Image (spheres, rainbow, N blue to C red):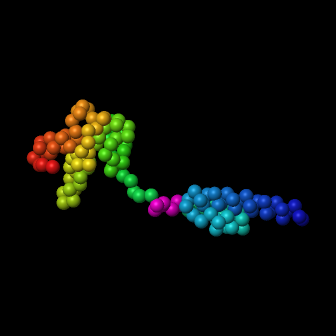
Amino acid sequence: MGIFWFALIIQGVISGGFCAYIASQKNKDSSEWFVLGFLFSILAVLALIAIPNENNTDQPDITLRTCPYCAERIKKQAIFCRFCQKDLPVLNHDSETNAVDLQYSENHAITSKHSENNGVSLKEQMRLYNQKKGGNI
Protein backbone atom coordinates (compact mmCIF):
# COMPACT_ATOMS: atom_id res chain seq x y z
CA MET A 1 0.00 0.00 0.00
CA GLY A 2 2.94 2.35 0.65
CA ILE A 3 4.14 2.12 -2.97
CA PHE A 4 0.70 3.18 -4.21
CA TRP A 5 0.76 6.41 -2.16
CA PHE A 6 4.37 7.08 -3.12
CA ALA A 7 3.54 6.66 -6.83
CA LEU A 8 0.46 8.86 -6.44
CA ILE A 9 2.50 11.65 -4.81
CA ILE A 10 5.24 11.40 -7.49
CA GLN A 11 2.61 11.53 -10.22
CA GLY A 12 1.02 14.59 -8.55
CA VAL A 13 4.35 16.41 -8.29
CA ILE A 14 5.18 15.69 -11.94
CA SER A 15 1.71 16.79 -13.08
CA GLY A 16 1.86 19.89 -10.85
CA GLY A 17 5.27 20.82 -12.21
CA PHE A 18 4.07 20.41 -15.77
CA CYS A 19 1.01 22.58 -15.04
CA ALA A 20 3.19 25.24 -13.38
CA TYR A 21 5.46 25.34 -16.45
CA ILE A 22 2.56 25.67 -18.90
CA ALA A 23 0.92 28.32 -16.68
CA SER A 24 4.10 30.42 -16.62
CA GLN A 25 4.26 30.24 -20.43
CA LYS A 26 0.66 31.49 -20.62
CA ASN A 27 1.23 34.31 -18.08
CA LYS A 28 -0.88 32.61 -15.41
CA ASP A 29 -0.09 32.12 -11.71
CA SER A 30 2.15 29.05 -11.67
CA SER A 31 1.78 28.28 -7.94
CA GLU A 32 -2.02 27.99 -8.18
CA TRP A 33 -1.71 25.76 -11.23
CA PHE A 34 0.88 23.59 -9.45
CA VAL A 35 -1.66 22.88 -6.70
CA LEU A 36 -4.40 22.20 -9.25
CA GLY A 37 -2.06 19.91 -11.20
CA PHE A 38 -1.05 18.08 -8.03
CA LEU A 39 -4.68 17.49 -7.00
CA PHE A 40 -6.35 16.90 -10.37
CA SER A 41 -3.47 15.65 -12.55
CA ILE A 42 -4.40 15.21 -16.20
CA LEU A 43 -7.66 17.18 -15.85
CA ALA A 44 -5.73 20.28 -14.78
CA VAL A 45 -3.24 19.83 -17.64
CA LEU A 46 -6.07 19.57 -20.17
CA ALA A 47 -7.87 22.59 -18.69
CA LEU A 48 -4.69 24.66 -18.80
CA ILE A 49 -3.97 23.70 -22.38
CA ALA A 50 -7.53 24.65 -23.35
CA ILE A 51 -7.48 28.22 -21.96
CA PRO A 52 -5.97 30.92 -24.20
CA ASN A 53 -2.83 32.92 -23.49
CA GLU A 54 -3.19 36.20 -21.63
CA ASN A 55 -1.90 39.18 -23.56
CA ASN A 56 1.24 40.66 -22.05
CA THR A 57 0.37 44.30 -21.29
CA ASP A 58 3.96 45.15 -20.30
CA GLN A 59 5.07 45.39 -23.93
CA PRO A 60 3.84 48.35 -25.98
CA ASP A 61 1.97 47.78 -29.21
CA ILE A 62 4.64 48.00 -31.91
CA THR A 63 3.51 48.42 -35.47
CA LEU A 64 5.77 47.78 -38.41
CA ARG A 65 6.34 49.36 -41.78
CA THR A 66 8.46 48.47 -44.79
CA CYS A 67 11.77 50.20 -45.49
CA PRO A 68 11.45 52.04 -48.82
CA TYR A 69 15.06 51.14 -49.74
CA CYS A 70 15.50 47.45 -48.85
CA ALA A 71 11.87 46.32 -48.27
CA GLU A 72 12.63 44.84 -44.83
CA ARG A 73 10.06 45.13 -42.01
CA ILE A 74 11.09 47.74 -39.42
CA LYS A 75 9.43 49.54 -36.51
CA LYS A 76 7.07 52.31 -37.54
CA GLN A 77 8.93 54.87 -35.40
CA ALA A 78 12.35 54.01 -36.91
CA ILE A 79 14.43 56.87 -38.29
CA PHE A 80 17.28 54.63 -39.47
CA CYS A 81 17.01 51.21 -41.16
CA ARG A 82 18.97 48.56 -39.29
CA PHE A 83 19.24 46.42 -42.41
CA CYS A 84 20.36 48.78 -45.18
CA GLN A 85 21.79 51.47 -42.83
CA LYS A 86 19.89 54.33 -44.53
CA ASP A 87 18.09 57.27 -42.97
CA LEU A 88 14.34 56.94 -43.29
CA PRO A 89 11.64 59.51 -43.90
CA VAL A 90 9.37 60.01 -40.89
CA LEU A 91 5.70 59.16 -41.30
CA ASN A 92 3.44 62.08 -40.33
CA HIS A 93 -0.27 61.30 -40.16
CA ASP A 94 -2.77 63.99 -41.10
CA SER A 95 -5.56 63.49 -38.57
CA GLU A 96 -8.29 65.10 -40.69
CA THR A 97 -7.78 63.18 -43.92
CA ASN A 98 -5.84 60.17 -42.58
CA ALA A 99 -3.32 60.85 -45.34
CA VAL A 100 0.29 59.93 -44.75
CA ASP A 101 2.94 62.54 -45.55
CA LEU A 102 6.57 61.47 -45.90
CA GLN A 103 8.89 64.13 -44.53
CA TYR A 104 12.46 64.10 -43.29
CA SER A 105 12.79 64.52 -39.56
CA GLU A 106 14.31 67.69 -38.10
CA ASN A 107 16.11 65.50 -35.56
CA HIS A 108 18.54 64.47 -38.30
CA ALA A 109 20.45 67.77 -38.48
CA ILE A 110 23.78 65.95 -38.75
CA THR A 111 25.70 64.58 -41.69
CA SER A 112 25.03 60.90 -42.03
CA LYS A 113 27.97 58.65 -42.78
CA HIS A 114 25.50 56.33 -44.50
CA SER A 115 24.00 59.01 -46.71
CA GLU A 116 24.41 58.61 -50.45
CA ASN A 117 24.68 62.42 -50.77
CA ASN A 118 28.32 62.38 -49.58
CA GLY A 119 28.71 65.20 -47.11
CA VAL A 120 25.37 66.96 -47.60
CA SER A 121 23.80 67.29 -44.18
CA LEU A 122 20.38 65.89 -43.58
CA LYS A 123 19.20 69.33 -42.51
CA GLU A 124 20.13 70.58 -46.00
CA GLN A 125 18.38 67.58 -47.55
CA MET A 126 15.29 68.39 -45.47
CA ARG A 127 15.39 72.01 -46.58
CA LEU A 128 15.58 71.00 -50.25
CA TYR A 129 12.85 68.42 -49.81
CA ASN A 130 10.53 70.89 -48.10
CA GLN A 131 11.25 73.53 -50.76
CA LYS A 132 10.10 71.06 -53.42
CA LYS A 133 6.89 70.59 -51.44
CA GLY A 134 6.43 74.33 -51.07
CA GLY A 135 7.13 74.63 -47.35
CA ASN A 136 10.04 75.77 -45.21
CA ILE A 137 11.69 74.32 -42.12
User: In the displayed structure, would residue 38 be above or below residue 25?
Assistant: below
Question: The N terminus lies in which quarter of the figure?
Answer: bottom right
The foreground one among 105 and 50 is 105
Query: Secondary structure of the magenta portion, mostly?
Result: loop
The residue at 31%/38% (across/down) is 86
Horizontal side of 125 relative to 18 (left or right) equals: left
User: In the displayed structure, would residue 100 be above or below residue 32?
Assistant: above
The residue at 38%/40% (across/down) is 82
Q: Is residue 27 visible?
A: yes
The foreground one among 93 and 124 is 124
User: What's drawn in magenta, residue-wise?
Assistant: 52-58
Horizontal side of 84 relative to 125 (left or right) equals: right
Q: Find residue 78 and report its horizontal and vertical position in percent.
A: 33, 47
Q: Is residue 68 visible?
A: no
The residue at 21%/59% (across/down) is 95
Q: Find residue 97 and report its horizontal and vertical position in percent.
A: 18, 57
| The image quarter in which residue 38 lies | bottom right
- Tag count: 0
